[in-house]
Amino acid sequence: MSAAPSVARAGKPRLRVALIADFREENWPSMDRVATTLYERVTANHRDTIALELIRPPFVRRFSRIRARGTKAYQADRVLNRLVDYPRVLRRVRGHFDIFHIVDHSYAHLVHHLPAARTLVTCHDLDAFRCLIEPRREPRGIPFRLMTRWSLSGLRRARLIVANSRTTLAELLRFGIAPPDRLNVIAFGVADVFSPAPDHAADEECLRLLGPRDPSRLAMLHVGLPIPRKRLDRLLRIVAAVAQRRPVSLIRVGGALSPEDHALAVQLGVNDRVVGLPRIEDSVLAAVYRHVDLLVLPSDAEGFCFPLAEAMACGLPVIASDLPVMRETGGDAVEYVSRDDLGAWCEAIVRLAEERRDDGAAWRDRRARGMAQARRFSWEACAAATVSQYQRLAG
């Protein structure tokens, strides 16, 4: 990590911006995607005006020697890295930058160690603060609430907050996190690799992982970490309901089922229908989108839902929970279902499977609407809008 240069090609000083990313070891794919893609696009398209540096310190292991997400040793390391090590790094380098951009709202406690008037925070959703703003909905222990309060107070101090959707913006206003003049909406983009066009190497790797398609079996896909709001328990019940009507398999990308969800899969008799994949490269994920029949997203909450947008870009139809943020991203290209209506999920999935089999024109139109909707989300536009916020802070 070195100080950002400020020499512009035309002789005018560039704005020195620190892009503050998550620890990679925390394994939040969407947060990592935002940081790395913004860095790439701003550096490529705005290098004459912005000198951007990606800040991502090494994760210091004191108690956990190997990746052990979820263990007490890992959680202790995580707290110390967030609250002690990262602030120490920022205090050492903050004099080298004009503007600071924290790309994950759960790291907003870092605002306390930066010039708040020159700091921007991207807010993906308010789930990290739910125990404070809606304590009955998500009760947590005192230590967790204290750390969350410190982070929320940092978010409130930031000069600007960028929400990734109008839905998130509405929540920020509803809970009085910041006034309207400090808020803006900048949607994320969809990477070019997510496309209906074949990619020989990636498609071969997909076949190696999943084997050839069985045309007699409906192949459903879910992409997302095994965290509570993704509702993998609901997903497994949906698979079990569909399995009573037709052969079906579920491909899961994003991590192994929790012990509780694995036990539920065994209880429902669908454990042998679930194929789990590890975290894979984007090109292979795009090939998986092209390989299956449907993406199913039964979440209780989302921020900007990358899998939904990526699937549409690849021409894969999507069935999703009827949430405002899902409708904001999916428009009229997605089939929406009430979250807790298991029968409606089953009917929608079977109906789309029959449409694919019996009505080629309707299926092609559905895919075309999805691809058109996905084209609304551009990383170039996201980078340009973000740069405008940097300039607003500097001004």
Image (cartoon, helix red, strand yellow):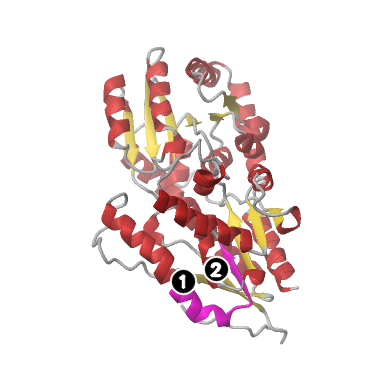
In the picture, measured across the screen, residue 104 lies left or right of residue 74, that is right
In the image, residue 250 sits, relative to residue 305, either above or below, namely above
Q: CA distance from mark 1 to mark 2?
A: 9 Å
- Check the image and report above or below for 102 versus 276: below
Whether the residues at callouts 1 and 2 have beta carbons within 8 Å, the answer is: yes
- Left or right: 204 in relation to 170: left
Q: Residue at x 66, y 38 (%)?
A: 328
56 or 245: which is nearer to us? Answer: 56
Toward the front, the furthest residue is 142
Give the labeled residue for mark 1. Answer: 87
Whichever of labels 1 and 2 marks the residue nearer the N terminus, that label is 1
For this rendering, which residue is in front, 132 or 90? 132
Dot 1: within a 10 Å radius of its alpha carbon, few (fewer than 14), some, or many (20 or more) residues?
some
The image position of residue 326, as x and y in percent, is 60, 36
Q: Amino acid at mark 2?
A: His
**Residue 148: horizontal and vertical position, in percent?**
48, 54
Is residue 92 located in the magenta-colored stretch of the structure? yes
Residue 211 seen in this snapshot: no
**In this figure, what is the number of numbered marks?**
2
Q: What element does badge 2 sit on? A: helix
- Label ID, residue 279: none
Is 113 one of the magenta-colored residues?
Answer: no
- Say which of marks 1 and 2 sits in front: 2
Q: Which residues are magenta?
A: 87-102
Disc 2 designates what residue? 112
SS for callout 1: helix
Q: In the figure, residue 220 lies in which quadrant?
A: top left
Q: Position of residue 118 (x, y in %)?
A: 65, 71
Determine the residue positioned at 42% across, 62% down.
23
Name the one closer to the observer, 354 or 323.
Answer: 323
Q: Residue at x 44, y 45 (%)?
A: 285
